[in-house]
Image (cartoon, helix red, strand yellow):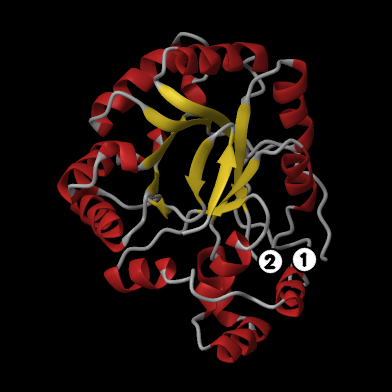
Amino acid sequence: MIHVEFNGTKVPSLGFGTWQLRDKDCEIGVAKALEVGYRHIDTAQIYENEEQVGAGIKASGVKREDIFLTTKIWMSNVRDGALQRSLDVSLKKLGTDYVDLLLIHWPVKEVPFADQMSGLKKVQAEKLTKLIGVSNFTVAQMKEVAEQLEAPIATNQVEYHPFLSQRPVLDYLQSKNMFLTAYSPLARGKINHEQALETISHKYGRSVGQICLRWLVQQQGVVAIPKAGSEKHIRENFDIFNFELATEDMRKIHALAHPGGRLINPDWAPHWDLHEAA
């Protein structure tokens, strides 16, 4: 396992994403991921599966202190006060008295960032979370919370895969020794229809998914959190630490990014940073 580090906390560079995993499938998936060797689990209030994630962790028998656990505050709960109350509910569902990383899930313009960061800082001071961060924030928004408001954010969790360049976001995070957490790292299966990725996968004798995940974690300060519903894919996604992509192949994958590569763009999304193909 490769790790990234923030203020002395080591974060496994590959995590198990649980978006769209529900009920018993989620519990079994989390337990199986931990059995395979994952030590980083990602969930969110809006996924409505925190209780099942907690049950999966308990069923796995892996010690809580050996797991890096992330959840995210939903948009309706970001106000100082509401944030703390919603986190209490999340912790009860997860069956733990702390998370390792707590994120604001989407930037909410109607609530001042100062108010949101105040809530985050308070729960961190109370040791209800080790690290705090954001998700789907632009560079300008990260600068506001990290520089103007001096919130010690560790990461920005954003969509990142071969078809979407996140160069502006990644450059800023790297300049501040933060890390990028890549969600939808396999572009919701679209990677499987790209000839250039197939060619590279044949070269290494690996699946296209393994090539893409390796491409992500091989970048400085990048963590990937693929979701997998089957044991086969859970194992396959984890098996990426015994090979390395050549520089030329890293460049070829970067070159696949294009302006229409973004897949997640809801009505409430911010005005994204401009990104260009490598």
- The residue that label 2 is drawn on is 163
Measured as percent of width and height from the top left, residue 200 is found at: 63, 85
In the rendered structure, which amino acid carries the disc numbered 1? His
Q: CA distance from mark 2 to mark 1?
A: 6 Å
Name which residue lies at 56% across and 86% down. 204
Residue 67 in view of the camera? yes
Where disc 1 sits, the SS reads loop
Q: Which of 63/277 is in front?
A: 63
Q: Is residue 135 above or below residue 171?
A: above
**Are the residues tagged 2 and 1 within 8 Å (C-beta)?**
yes
Q: Is residue 193 left or right of residue 95?
A: right
Tag of residue 258: 1
Name which residue lies at 52% across and 31% down. 103
Measured as percent of width and height from the top left, residue 92 is found at: 25, 25
Measured as percent of width and height from the top left, residue 215 is found at: 62, 68
Residue 219 quadrant: bottom right
Q: Is residue 57 above or below residue 45?
A: below
Q: Is residue 207 above or below residue 267?
A: below
